[in-house]
Image (spheres, grey):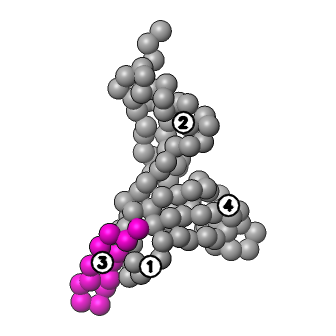
Amino acid sequence: CRRHGFIHRLDVPNSGLLLAAKSYEAYMHMQLRLAVGNMVRDYATLSHGWIAASLQKVGASVHWRAESPTTVGGQGKASTTHLRTRKHVSRQTIAFTLATVRIRTGRSHQIR
């Protein structure tokens, strides 16, 4: 049986990104990485505001409930996010930051 194709839907229901394999070898490799939890997830983000280039790690507690907005702190689960600022852009009084984000803990809605 040759298995390849869709493997996993990442970050359900947030991004809806699909992980797919073009070959059996790639399929098995990615399935194994998912099973042992060492799949690296990098995101390109465009954030409103000016994020200092010196900010490289964010540690916070993320609390998510389906019926209310995600909150930081309090009863949430510990989370770690690494980021790298790529570029700053400002237009009149509005600033944006393009950054690469790597989520280490995989909490629901952590990237928000």
What is the three-letter code of the residue carrying label 3? Answer: His
How would you classify the magenta stretch by its main secondary structure?
A: strand
Residue at the spot of label 4: 65
Q: CA distance from mark 1 to mark 3?
A: 13 Å
Residue 95 in the image: state x and y as whole percent. 32, 83
Three-letter code, disc 4: Arg
Label 2: how many Cα within 10 Å (few below 14, some 14–19, many 20+)? few
Query: Which residue matches tag 2?
Result: 33
* Residue furthest left as drawn: 91
The percent coordinates of residue 12 (x first, y second) are: 53, 47
- How far apart are the two marked residues, 2 and 4, measured between alpha carbons? 28 Å
Which mark lies nearer to you, 1 or 3? Answer: 1
Residue identifier under label 3: 88
- Viewer-proximal residue, 35 or 16? 35
- 23 vs 76, left or right, is left
Residue under label 1: 54
